[in-house]
Image (spheres, coloured by chain):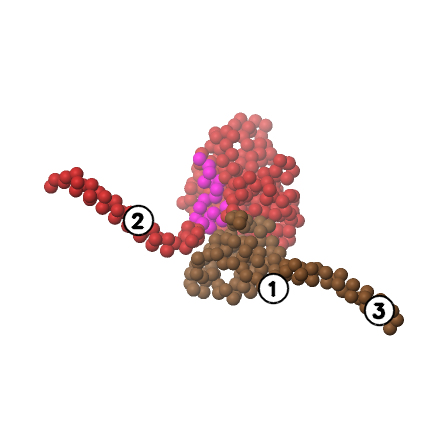
């Protein structure tokens, strides 16, 4: 069958018209179904990430290979509205770096793998199995969730800073000043804190509930951060820990940190 | 009564001074006699009936807060069976994005100062 130019243009024109109309009709249908603004989040809430014991593995070598990369810290501090103060005494930190001999006090040998000795491992809240911060909190503003997250309720924190004294890892920061003016890019869907409240990493509980991995894990291109359920034998983190030598911070204290550092 | 004239004049002056804020505002027409929170959303139903929300929204918000933060329960099923995320910033403020005309309208009238916004961030409102 042959088709002349006139017929072709007619057909093409009609087809694109039909396409446009169809798209409009479809568009209207969809907008009626989707609840304004809430659809995506509700769908996410139907499939949260769940575990019996959340934990993270940090591969020091992979991390160090990125040299002065701070992507995970930036991502975390952005999404959680963590303020940036000029005065280091006011510092608020959820993730930070520390020289090896500070991070692994009493585990540093005089002679040790050079790259390890000169590394600056990433530090987090350790989400300890036996968290001293929880024992000392007088208002139960911090507690251990069943999935292992050491959670905070900022509504309830009275700023007594017992938890900061209790935490042997310096994972908690106190808001000495109103943080709001010191947040560069305010994220409107996450709260800030107020003056007189302690804050720390929560393993991104708000993202896990929506089925998303923690922001730092997502931000890391190098695959240096692996997050998963230690009670799941098939989880990547379990395989990683089975195959590699790992250390934890201040193991002698019996807090049982859930952040593992792979050093092999 | 001795010095009745002086005492009465004194009393009148005293009462006038003490009630100054009231009649000054009344004279200026600043006293709101009713509140009218504006609803801007096209959404037809709230998470609970209007009468309940008017009287008890603070209790509902407290329940939502405790459920989300402390129990990690984040989905609220309304009486109609419809599901909502328990979230002040998302669910409530998605519809009531006009905080100054909705929340503040009654809160200012009744002189309450909720501390929600010390931490939670109110939606951006277009400046009139």
- The chain ID associated with circle 3 is B
Determine if marks 2 and 3 fall on one subunit.
Answer: no
Q: Quadrant of residue B22?
A: bottom right
Label 2 element class: helix
* Magenta stretch encompasses residue A143: no
Q: Which mark is residue A23?
A: 2
Q: Which chain is red?
A: A
Q: Position of residue B109 (x, y in %)?
A: 61, 60
Above/below status of A257 relative to A110: below
Q: Which residues are magenta?
A: A203-221
* CA distance for labels 1 and 2: 51 Å
**Label 3 Cα crowd, 10 Å radius (few <14 / some 14-19 / many 20+):** few
The residue beneath circle 3 is: B5
Above/below status of B44 relative to A105: below
Q: Residue at x 40, y 45 (%)?
A: A234
The residue beneath circle 1 is: B33
Label 1 element class: loop
Q: Nearer the viewer, residue B19 or B69?
A: B19
Q: Residue at x 37, y 55 (%)?
A: A32
Residue A30 seen in the figure: yes
């Amino acid at each position: 069958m042959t088709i002349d130019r006139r017929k072709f243009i007619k057909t093409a024109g009609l087809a694109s018209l039909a396409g446009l109309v169809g798209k409009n009709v479809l568009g209207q249908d969809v907008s009626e179904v989707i609840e304004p603004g809430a659809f995506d989040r509700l769908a996410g809430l139907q499939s949260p990430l769940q575990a019996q014991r959340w934990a993270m593995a940090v591969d020091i070598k992979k991390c160090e290979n990125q040299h002065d990369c701070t992507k995970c810290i930036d991502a975390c501090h952005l999404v959680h509205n963590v303020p940036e103060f000029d005065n280091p005494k006011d510092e608020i930190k959820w993730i930070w770096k520390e020289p090896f001999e500070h991070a692994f006090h009493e585990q540093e040998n005089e002679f040790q793998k050079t790259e390890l000795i000169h590394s600056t491992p990433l530090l987090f809240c350790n989400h300890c199995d036996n968290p001293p911060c929880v024992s000392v909190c007088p208002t139960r503003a911090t507690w251990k969730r069943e999935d292992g997250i050491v959670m905070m309720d900022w509504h309830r924190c009275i700023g007594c800073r017992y938890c900061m004294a209790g935490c042997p890892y310096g994972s908690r920061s106190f808001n000495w000043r109103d943080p709001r003016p010191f947040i560069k890019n305010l994220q409107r869907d996450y709260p800030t804190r107020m003056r007189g409240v302690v804050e720390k990493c929560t393993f991104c509980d708000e993202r896990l509930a929506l089925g998303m991995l923690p922001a730092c894990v997502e931000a890391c291109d190098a695959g240096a951060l692996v997050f998963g359920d230690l009670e799941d034998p098939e989880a990547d983190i379990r395989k990683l820990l089975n195959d590699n030598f790992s250390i934890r911070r201040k193991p002698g204290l019996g807090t049982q940190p859930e952040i593992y550092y792979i050093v092999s | 009564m001795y010095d009745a004239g002086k005492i009465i004049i004194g009393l009148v002056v005293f009462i006038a001074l003490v009630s100054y804020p009231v009649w000054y505002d009344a004279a200026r027409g600043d006293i709101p006699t009713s509140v009218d929170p504006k609803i801007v959303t096209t959404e037809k139903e709230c998470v609970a009936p209007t009468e309940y929300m008017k009287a008890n929204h603070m209790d509902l918000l407290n329940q939502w807060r405790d459920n989300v933060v402390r129990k990690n329960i984040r989905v609220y099923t309304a009486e109609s069976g419809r599901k909502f995320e328990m979230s002040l910033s998302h669910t409530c403020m998605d519809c009531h994005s006009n905080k100054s005309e909705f929340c503040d309208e009654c809160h200012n009238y009744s002189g309450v100062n909720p501390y929600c916004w010390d931490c939670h961030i109110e939606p951006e409102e277009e400046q009139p």
